[in-house]
């Protein structure tokens, strides 16, 4: 009895495996049928009467290819598909291109033309159509499976299932999932087979196909039986019985067989073997005479070793299948022809409707014209009546206005008396204001003179520091020298802020026009705050994208002044941990103009952000309500705003929960695109052996300028005032004159005029570079007013001095 039960268990497992294989092949055939149905429907929907002859030929060729493929005439199928693909080469026909390319790859795979099949599958996958991409993936998966690339094949199967689900094609997704489950079960991959069966069951549930759910339940039950999970198999088979509903008695009998076999309380006897045999006979009778019967029979005979009988059964299966396919294709072709004829009739009816609509539109236009003329006459008479009525009302208003004029005349007399009183007060206030403006002007002149006196020693400090930084023996003191230079630059900026305050109050401010590197200028400015950031453990970063790679023309000192004021305000934030300066370059309103976008982002907490917005948005007059107040200490922010606006720029404040952004947009002109440092290095040989006259009353500045120029091979002659400079120029020819504007005995302006006269007498021309701490000469145009070729503002660094000197000498050499 024990041996009998063991044999029965093996018989059930074997029977379940055969049924799973049968179901797999049946599911594959059903999936192909679904593919054909979807393909025919899509082709019918794609055909439109207005599409033209070329589109109709493409559809016909594609349908012929499908017919050849169904008859396994693969060579002719490929030929038809290739012709269809050529005919489909129309604009905006990406879906047919993907579909036909996928079919060609599928047929080439059947012909074992692996490389060509790969090529067409790659072409098809370039286009992502939601309907046909899953089919291409399905064909590609079959292709890779035939090549033996199982990993990629399973991945493509899974993508095809996902694509079918995403596009709403649940039926092919369900059938393919069921087939993959059968394949994994045959390979012994129980977990993967279970996963695919569950996907197939879920899709069948969504489609409402109870019979498919029962088939999935049967497959899962046999899977669990083979895995030794009888309780789970019993539960699944019991659930599958509820979905059969007597639609498939054979499937119902199989599920009952599993339920009985896996029932823990059931006792297996000889009757169980007889019932099992009866089910097998019933299945055979159910399938007898059909193509599925011969297919299963051939497989069973092949496993039994009956090769001749298996071949006979296989031939009968092919005969049944070919007959069914021919009938199906004939029906589909008839439907397609009927559809084409219906579409042609519809086109003729549409043409008749268009003609009738045209005639109706003509009659309607005549009717509307008559109605329009009638309405025009009515409108004309109405307009005449309204005009008469309006004139009558105007006369009444005129009488009323005359009365009001008399009343207003009396009111004007009274107002004149009040105006005389106000004029007296105004005269008094004007006198007071003129006195105040005179006082402010005196203060401004004093500040300008004081600034000019301070810039000379600052230039000396900055020049000596820059010179020391170039010596290798000062490397140990490099940090201290940088601090000295940074502090000097801070003092210069404070002087600029002080002068700008006075200039803003008087409405006079001037901007320089120099070529500069925005990235280098901003990096140098941020170096002043590097030590403070490190001391407070604050991350300070600068990010410039690829667009900020050009030299600009503008005022780099003003940019440094704006950024320094804003950075001081940022460092006042609470809980500050990181500061990021982002740079972008935007196109301006002309080809040679650019807008520099600077974003100062920080993660600190801003106290009273509303006050900051008021400083940035309030009318300008409000900043001067109280002399020196500048919004309760926000002088730097107010000055930055005015400096940005006077350059036609924009300064914005954006605050969030944990972030603050100061956005600066400044327009600039593009300069010649070669870096200043590279140009200096490239043309530094121009100074070799050149004679340069330096007129400067400050000995320290003489030493700094001479040191820089002599390092480049120039011969420098120093003079303490204009008289000495004029005498030196009379005795010797010079290649360049560097002229300080404020000197004793004879200032730079008169000295320049005298040198020009002497040069004219000698029959030669010499470039003159103005070197000044004055805020007036801040552009080459203003320097030209005083017969000077260019200017250099104090304090300056060695690169600016060399750039100006080399530029003037190079122009002279070219001439």
Image (cartoon, rainbow, N blue to C red):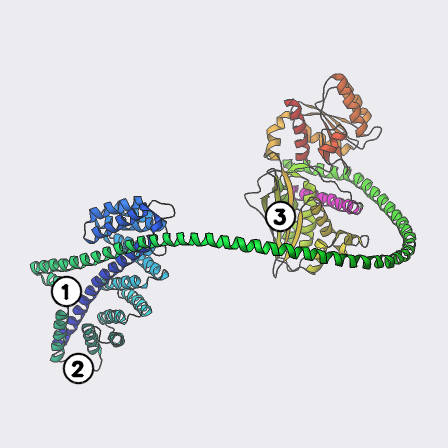
Nearest to viewer (mark 3 / mark 1): 1
Query: 740 or 301, which lies in front?
Result: 301
Which label number is shown at residue 28?
Answer: none
Task: Using a 10 Å C-alpha cutoff, classify the residue at mark 1 as few (fewer than 14 neighbours), some (14 to 19) or many (20 or more).
Answer: few
Position of residue 751 relative to residue 522, above or below, is above
Spatial distance from mark 3 to mark 1, Cα to Cα?
A: 80 Å
Position of residue 147 relative to residue 610, above or below, is above
Mark 2 lies on a secondary structure that is: loop
Occupied quadrant, residue 44: bottom left
Dominant secondary structure (helix, strand or loop) of the stretch shown in magenta: helix
Query: 246 or 372, which lies in front?
Result: 372
Is residue 541 inside the magenta stretch? Answer: no
Spot occupied by residue 503 in the image (x, y as percentages of width and height) = 78, 44
Q: Residue at x 80, y 54 (%)?
A: 625
Task: Using a 10 Å C-alpha cutoff, classify the residue at mark 2 as few (fewer than 14 neighbours), some (14 to 19) or many (20 or more).
Answer: few
In the rendered structure, the answer to whether residue 770 lies left or right of residue 217 reads right
Residue 770 visible in the current orientation? no
Q: Residue at x 19, y 52 (%)?
A: 72
Nearest to viewer (mark 1 / mark 2): 1
Spatial distance from mark 1 to mark 2, Cα to Cα?
A: 36 Å
Q: Which residues are magenta?
A: 476-505
Spot occupied by residue 798 in the image (x, y as percentages of width and height) = 67, 34
- Give the mark, 3 or 1, whose residue is nearer the N terminus: 1
Query: 656 or 206, which lies in front?
Result: 206
Q: Which residue is mark 1?
A: 290
In the rendered structure, the answer to whether residue 93 lies left or right of residue 512 reads left
Q: Which residue is mark 2?
A: 267
Spot occupied by residue 800 in the image (x, y as percentages of width and height) = 67, 35
Position of residue 762 relative to residue 186, above or below, is above
Where does the N terminus fall, quadrant-wise? bottom left
- Give the mark, 1 or 2, whose residue is nearer the N terminus: 2
Which label number is shown at residue 598?
Answer: 3
């Amino acid at each position: 009895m024990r041996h009998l039960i063991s044999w029965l268990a093996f018989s059930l497992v074997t029977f379940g495996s055969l049924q799973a294989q049968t179901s797999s092949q049946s599911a594959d055939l059903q999936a192909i049928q679904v593919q054909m149905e979807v393909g025919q429907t899509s082709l019918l929907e794609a055909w439109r009467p207005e599409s033209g002859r070329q589109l109709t030929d493409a559809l016909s060729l594609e349908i012929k290819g499908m017919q050849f493929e169904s008859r396994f005439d693969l060579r002719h199928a490929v030929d038809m598909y290739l012709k269809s693909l050529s005919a489909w080469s129309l604009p905006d026909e990406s879906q047919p291109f993907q579909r036909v390319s996928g079919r060609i790859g599928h047929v080439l795979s059947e012909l074992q033309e692996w490389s060509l099949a790969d090529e067409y599958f790659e072409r098809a996958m370039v286009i992502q159509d939601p309907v046909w991409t899953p089919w291409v993936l399905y064909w590609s998966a079959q292709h890779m499976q035939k090549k033996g690339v199982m990993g990629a094949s399973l991945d493509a199967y899974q993508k095809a299932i996902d694509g079918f689900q995403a596009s709403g094609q649940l039926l092919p997704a369900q059938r393919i999932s069921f087939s993959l489950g059968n394949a994994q079960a045959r390979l012994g991959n129980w977990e993967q087979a279970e996963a695919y069966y569950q996907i197939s069951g879920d899709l069948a549930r969504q489609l409402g196909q109870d019979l498919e759910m029962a088939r999935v339940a049967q497959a899962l039950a046999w899977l669990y039986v083979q895995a030794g999970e009888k309780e789970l198999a019993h539960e699944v088979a019991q659930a599958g019985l509820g979905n059969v509903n007597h639609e498939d008695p054979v499937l119902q009998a199989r599920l009952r067989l599993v339920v009985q076999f896996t029932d823990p309380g059931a006792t297996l006897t000889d009757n169980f073997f007889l019932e099992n045999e009866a089910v097998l006979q019933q299945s055979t009778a159910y399938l007898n005479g059909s193509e599925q019967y011969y297919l299963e029979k051939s497989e069973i005979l092949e496993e039994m070793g009956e090769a001749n009988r298996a071949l006979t059964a296989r031939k009968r299966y092919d005969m049944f299948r070919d007959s069914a396919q021919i009938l199906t294709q004939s029906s589909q072709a008839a439907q397609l022809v009927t559809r084409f004829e219906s579409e042609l009739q519809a086109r003729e009816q549409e043409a008749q409707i268009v003609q009738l609509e045209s005639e109706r539109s003509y009659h309607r236009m005549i009717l509307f014209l008559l109605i329009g003329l009638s309405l025009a006459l009515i409108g004309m008479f109405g307009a005449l009546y309204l005009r008469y009525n309006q004139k009558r009302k105007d006369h009444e208003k005129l009488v009323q206005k005359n009365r009001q004029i008399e009343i207003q005349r009396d009111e004007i007399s009274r107002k004149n008396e009040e105006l005389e009183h106000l004029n007296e007060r105004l005269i008094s206030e004007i006198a007071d204001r003129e006195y105040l403006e005179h006082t402010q002007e005196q203060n401004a002149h004093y500040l300008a003179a004081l600034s000019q006196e301070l810039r000379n020693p600052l230039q000396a400090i900055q020049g000596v520091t820059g010179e020391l930084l170039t010596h290798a023996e000062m490397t140990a003191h490099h940090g201290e020298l940088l601090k000295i230079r940074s502090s000097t630059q801070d003092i210069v900026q404070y002087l600029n802020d002080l002068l700008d305050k006075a200039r803003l109050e008087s409405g006079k401010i001037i901007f320089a026009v120099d070529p500069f590197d925005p990235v280098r200028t901003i990096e140098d400015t941020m170096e002043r705050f590097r030590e403070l950031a490190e001391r407070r453990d604050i991350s300070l970063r600068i990010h410039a994208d690829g667009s900020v790679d050009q030299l600009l023309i503008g005022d780099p000192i003003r940019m440094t002044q704006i950024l320094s004021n804003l950075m001081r305000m940022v460092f006042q934030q609470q809980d500050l941990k990181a500061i990021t300066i982002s740079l972008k370059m935007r196109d301006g309103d002309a080809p040679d103009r650019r807008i520099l976008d600077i974003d100062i982002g920080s993660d600190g907490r801003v106290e009273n952000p509303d006050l900051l917005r008021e400083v940035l948005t309030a009318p300008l007059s409000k900043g001067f309500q109280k002399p020196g107040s500048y919004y309760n200490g926000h002088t730097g922010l107010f000055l930055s705003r005015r400096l940005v606006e006077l350059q036609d720029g924009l300064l914005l404040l954006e605050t969030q929960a944990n972030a603050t952004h100061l956005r600066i947009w400044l327009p600039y002109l593009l300069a010649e695109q070669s870096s200043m440092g590279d140009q200096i290095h490239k043309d530094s040989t121009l100074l070799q052996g050149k004679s340069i006259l330096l007129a400067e009353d400050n000995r320290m500045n003489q030493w700094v300028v001479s040191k820089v120029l002599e390092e480049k091979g120039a011969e420098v002659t120093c003079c303490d005032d204009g008289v000495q400079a004029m005498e030196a120029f009379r005795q010797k020819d010079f290649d360049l004159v560097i002229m300080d504007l404020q000197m004793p005995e004879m200032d730079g302006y008169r000295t320049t005029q005298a040198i020009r006269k002497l040069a004219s007498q000698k029959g030669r021309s010499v470039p003159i570079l103005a070197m000044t701490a004055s805020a007036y000469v801040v552009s080459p145009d203003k320097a030209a007013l005083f017969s000077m070729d260019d200017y250099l503002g104090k304090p300056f660094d060695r690169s600016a001095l060399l750039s100006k000197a080399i530029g003037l000498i190079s122009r002279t050499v070219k001439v």
